[in-house]
Each structure stands twice: as C-alpha cells, then as structure tokens.
Amino acid sequence: MPERTSYDAVIVGGGHNGLVAAAYLARAGRSVLVLERLDHTGGAAVSTRAFAGVDARLSRYSYLVSLLPSKIVQDLGLRFAVRKRTVSSYTPAVRDGRPTGLLVGGGEARTRTAFAELTGSDREFTAWQRFYGSTQRLAERVFPTLTEPLPTRAALRATVDDDALWHALFERPLGELVEETFTDDLVRGVVLTDALIGTFAGAHDPSLRQNRCFLYHVIGGGTGDWDVPIGGMGALTDALADAARRAGAEIVTDCAVTGIATDGRSAEVTCDQGTVGARRVLVNAAPRELARLLGEAPPPPAEGAQLKVNMLLTRLPRLRDTGVDLREAFSGTFHIAEGYRQLEDAYQQAASGGLPVSPPSEIYCHSLTDPSILGADLVRQGYQTLTLFGLHAPARLFTADNDATRDRLLAATLAELDTHLAEPLAGCLAHDADGRPCIEARSPLDLDRELGLPGGNIFHRDLAFPYAEPEDGAAEGTAPARWGVATTHPNVLLCGAGAVRGGGVSGIPGHNAAMAVLEEG
C-alpha cells in the first residue's frame, strides 16, 4: 500500500526509466511514488533464472548497454559497471565453396587482414574506417545533447557540423550511403543491421525509420560501443531501485495503475490499492498505455519486428570456419543470414505476409565476457549462454497463431545458424531440472502481453530524430516540451521509451522528465 495519499510525483511503471526519474526527483527532495503492476521492478531490463533448477541469470529481454550516459551512473551513485567486448562482430560466409567469415576486432592490423582475406583487397577496410570514423565524430557531437534540452533541427545540424554526413543520415535513405560506400554484399549487410534492430524497414524506406534506428545504434556513449552489463541487465535496474529508495522514493509493486485523471494542475492516479493524488504524473509506459489510462483515443498502432531467444549451452558449438577462434566468434555479434541482399529478401518476404525463408538474426555470448551470471558449478563445467535477436519478424505474422508461428520461425532461425556450424546446435543445449532443453523464445505478441510493449515494439513507437519539431518550438515551449517529454496535459509527462530521444536501455527519458519537473519548480 502507498504510505501517503498524495505525492509531488507519481511514476507509472517501475522500468529503468521510471526508476531513473524517481531517483533524481527524490534526491531533489520531492515526494515520489513508483507504481509497478508486476511483482518486481525493472521492466524489460531484468535478469531472470529462465530455466527450472538451473543457476543461470539471463538478461531475458534487453541485453546490451550503449546509450546509458555515464552522467546518470555518476549522478545517482550507481553500483553498476559494464565490460567491453574484445570483438565487435563475426559474420560467417561461404566464398568459392569454402567456409570463411569476417571477424571485426582484435586491433586494426588484424581487422584489415580479415577484410582483405574475405574481399581480396584493402578497399572495403579503408571504406569501413572512413565510414565509422564519420559515425564516431557524429557520436561525439550528438550523444551529449541527449541529456540537454531538446535542440532544434537547425541547432543539431550545426552541432554535427558536417553537411555531407547530415544529408546522408538525416535526409536520404541509409541504403544510398551504404551502397555508395561499400561494394561487398556481406560488408554492406553488417553495416545495415544496426538500422534494423527492432525496426521493420528496408534499406531504402522513404520514411527513414531505418536511419533513425541506425543513428541511435552508433552514437551511444559517444563511441557507438555496445557493452556487456556485469551481472546481467538486472544489475542495472536493481542498482537504480536501490538508488531511488535510498533517496527516499517509495516503490510499490503488484499494483497495476488503472486510470489517470488530470485538470492540468493536479492529478489523481487510480491503482489496485486505491487512488493517490499527485502534482505531476510521469508515465514510464508506452503512449498507447498512457492513452488508455487517460481514457483517450489511442495513437497509431505500433509494431515490433523481432524474435528474442535465450539459450544455455553445455559448450559452444564448433564452426565450419576453422580459421576463427570459437570464443572470439561468439563473444561479439555473430551475424546470421545478414548479407545485404539476404536482409532485403527477408524484408520483402515478411512484408508480403510470409516468414523469411532464411531468417536473419544475430547472437552473442554474455558469459564469455561476464561469467558472473552463471553459478560456479556451471562455469567450471564450461557452460555458456547465447542470446539471439531475430530481425524482420513483424507482429502481423503472428496474429493468426502466435505459438505455432513462433515455433516455426525459431526452427527456421536455428536451422540457418546450423548451416554455419560443424555440428547441430541442439546437441549443445543444456537441459533444465525437468529434462527440457534450455531455450526460450519470445515473439512481438509475447512481448506485448508480458511487458505492455505495443505490438511488441521495443521502442514503444517509431524512433524520432533527436531534435525538436517544429524547429522553433522547443526554446519557447514549456519545460516538458523543451525536454522532449510533453503530452497534451501540462502535468503528465512521458518518461519512457516513447518520449523523444527514448528507446534502448538509456535512462535518458527518465532523466529528461525529471529535469523538466525540476525546471518548472
């Protein structure tokens, strides 16, 4: 039960963004209540013992960290850290009938050699260096703005200070830049995958949703690196909940919010335990859920497009490509069926209403970088985790029969992985206490049901470019508008992934919503 009848701020949803907002506001002396419908905090950023009787805590949903600013970690005094992956990616291939692949990582000389051996020259590596040199400069300039008041489009363009890059990434379909820069199909595909994580689009989609997804995947931390959370993703949200409580925030779980009423100055939040008053309500849920709670018309439907699979193995499977070290291949992002043409074919097949013939996906092994998520006995026996994220699996494909479609897609995805293995993956799967293989899969509809992600969309809705629309609105608007967290109600703010500059495990919307509240006084 909530301890009080009214609060300065009531936060709906105890995911990582809601916890960030709660910690900042409580540290500033505000009375804060967090209401969470599940029996635990963390939302999609949790660690779970997914398999009965097995001492392995997997990052069940979100699994890597890039967009979390060090500023938030430092401001809130979080006991949380990440670890760099020694390898960026490995992509298996067959060239001239011979199994091979592209390993990116281990130093410049080694990566240059890998490119040359795959493509026959230094051209693609030189283009790769130039391309990612540009994205790193972009990251260094754009990432710091994400925890500042929302810039106008013109201001952000001036910050980027590179008209050619701006035009290529903010105004033209990403496919044009990829095709102008690279010639090898596999290299093109590796680049494009960052534009398709949870985003159903082609390389030349005129909506530029692929560009926006790509941008957020290459600017994190000012470097674009994707790091492993030590202890699993739940270590972050546990640290955030601790920080919020230490600052004085109250967190109530097993308490679903059923309605929000507001007159623009004060609000009432109704939940399973009754009704509480609030000066402001911060909603760490999708815009669809906000509309439902307010009794308003829902926004346009959102749609997720991914298959998420968690596995525990007794050992890593052997590869057909014997020229790469197993541990290096699986510690980075292992790309499967993600050549440029393969990605387009899969998109077109899914857009036409069918499952991709060769489902694209990518996997990595958390436990190679951070074995702490496994019990000591499992570590001694050589067990490893695998996380798989499948692309181009839109929710529409699952509506007729979610369970059967998920099972068919999972089987096809693993079969595609098996084409690059020297042995079937199934032979390496561990078994739980009941003798079942340690593998679980989630479709977009599963994510909607379990986490309230609309249509399974991991970003709550299409990502937005990190600037204000229209150009002259942010500086003259309210504090919530300036921070990109405004709704149609002055004292109701979005603090989740659906806010401008939301998406990913970042804490940025939570930070920005708290800053908007504190700015208004």
Image (cartoon, rainbow, N blue to C red):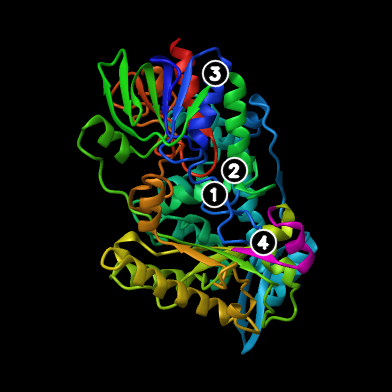
Q: Which residue is mark 2?
A: 220
The residue at the point 56 percent across, 82 percent down is 419
Say which residue label 4 marks. Answer: 332
- The CA distance from mark 4 to mark 2 is 17 Å
Q: Residue at x 47, y 48 (%)?
A: 169
Q: Nearer the viewer, residue 406 or 225?
A: 406
Task: Characterize the local packing of mark 2: few (<14), some (14-19) or many (20 or more) Cα atoms within 10 angstroms.
Answer: many
Q: Which label's residue is closer to the chain start, 4 or 3?
A: 3
What residue range appears in magenta? 373-386
Tags 4 and 3 touching, CB below 8 Å? no
The image's mark for residue 182 is: none
Would residue 84 be found to the left or right of residue 19 on screen?
Answer: right
At mark 1, the secondary structure is helix
From this view, report whether residue 194 is shown above or below residue 451: below
Residue where numbered disc 3 is placed = 26
Q: Amino acid at mark 3?
A: Ala
At label 1, counting other C-alpha atoms closer than 10 Å, the crowd grade (few under 14, some 14-19, many 20 or more) is: many
What residue is shown at x 68% (from left), y 71% (from top)?
Answer: 314
Instruction: Please provide percent x and percent y for residue 461.
Output: 36, 45
Residue under label 1, please give it. Answer: 217
User: Marks 1 and 2: CB-CB under 8 Å?
Assistant: yes
Observer-side mark, 1 or 4, equals 4
Q: Nearer the viewer, mark 1 or mark 3?
A: 3
The three-letter amino acid code for the residue at tag 1 is His
Q: CA distance from mark 1 to mark 2?
A: 7 Å
